[in-house]
Amino acid sequence: MVNAITFNQTHIAQEELEKQFGEKVQHIHKQMIEGTSVGAEFLGWKQLPNEIDQEELNQVLATAEKLRKSADVVVVIGVGGSYLGAKAVQDALSPYFGKHEDNPEVIFAGQNLSGTYMKQLLQHIDGKEVAVIVISKSGTTTEPAIAFRILLEYMENRYGAAMKDRVVAITDKSKGALRELANRSGFTTFVVPDDVGGRFSVLTPVGLLPIAVAGIDILQLLEGAKDAVKEYTSSELSTNSAYQYAALRNHLLNEGYNIEILASFTPNFATFHEWWKQLFGESEGKDGKGIYPASVAYPTDLHSLGQYVQDGRREIFETFVQFKETTANCAIPTTEDNLDGLNYLSDKTMNEINDVTLQATMQAHQDGGVPLIHLTVGKKDAYHIGYIIYFFEMACAMSAYLLGVNPFDQPGVEEYKKNIFRMLEKPGFVEEK
């Protein structure tokens, strides 16, 4: 299947968009193909869905099966790209209440420094069979490293030598603190590829293993991404909707719209918004440039942020993600007294009303002066989530290059860490003058 996403916008004519960005897009596309673009050493994600090692994929599936059989709870430790992608896919494709049948509960740690969170996590897992997946390229990133130190002590105290069969490390292939510990302890390990940055790593073992443990079909996830690779190979702006989205974002920025709001009417897609925000925020927000990525979960946020979107400062544009097919629905009953006045809806379903609300919201916001982008996705399943992941990755890289920044570094992330090390008096830390 191709064309799993339909891209629509009414802000600028396609001919004008091509006139502004067509040649630039072709030039950047050529550089990415030739490996001459800035940050090209981190373009490994571009062909990843087609080039993933089959032996490694089989090992991911086998390890996921082992963890599903041995654990009631699997704790995934990571921060940023080491957890957001996995959690985004898991939340989007899991039941709203409970978990996938016959699969362990997957929970996350290392993405915050709350002692209350960690204490309650330890209380939650006590008495259950537990496994841990720790994800870190270096093993020394503060937030996940602290969480792993605490959970490793818990696992050692509870399982003794058998602990090694319940801990999986996803880390650098040859160096770093976590690699050294994993080799010494005999943990099962997977590699964080050198040519794939964290926020682009969801289709590597970083994301695939936790997603598979949750009972989600990672083969279908990869199949969707593979078809997206085929779809977005063209350098022509007129035929590549991922590049159209990237160009349109830059056009809107040039017109003064410097905030993009990702909006959806699907509650369990909200964590995907967070992955999207990291993807674009870290890739574009540097050198004093970038579009600020924000998000809303409608219709909930129509009753809070909706007022600002409708009538506030005209510096925002919205990208709506709509899933056309749904897996379940609920009818509206009829009542005799009709006290709430809703009998006029009794021939409709909740999903029908949700879709009408989406269309009404788009119309209202466009009438209020908000430029709109509408991405229609066939269905919210593993295949289409894999497809839209790749769509956004490709669009993000092109958008950042059009902006004139390296999509794959994040120098600003280090600044707060330096302050932490200084304030906590980390041994050996010397601040550069």
Image: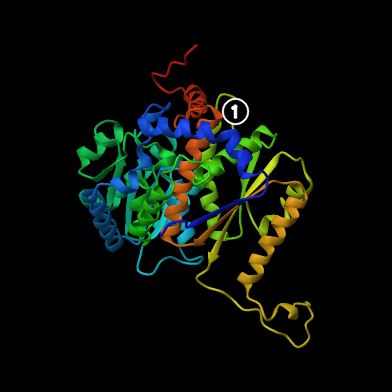
What residue lies at 30% left-to-right and 32% top-to-bottom? Answer: 177
> Element type at marker 1?
loop
Q: Is residue 150 above or below residue 96?
A: above
On the image, the x and y values in percent for residue 149 come to: 36, 40
Residue 197 can be seen, yes or no: yes
Compared to 231, does 349 lie above or below? below
Q: Which residue in the structure is indicated by mark 1?
A: 289
For badge 1, the amino acid type reads: Lys
Could you tell me which residue is drawn at 42 percent across and 27 percent down? 37
Task: Return the residue found at the far top.
Answer: 433
Q: Residue at x 67, y 81 (%)?
A: 347
Direction from residue 35 to residue 293 in the image, left or right = right
102 with respect to 24 (left or right): left
Camera-nearest residue between 9 and 282: 9
Tell how many labels: 1
Residue 197 sits in which quadrant?
A: top left
**Identity of the residue drawn at 71% across and 38% down:** 315
Quadrant of the image containing the N terminus: bottom left
Q: Position of residue 220 (x, y in %)?
A: 36, 59
Please provide percent x and percent y for residue 313: 76, 40
Q: Is residue 160 visible?
A: no
Provide residue 410's location: percent of width, then percent of height.
48, 29
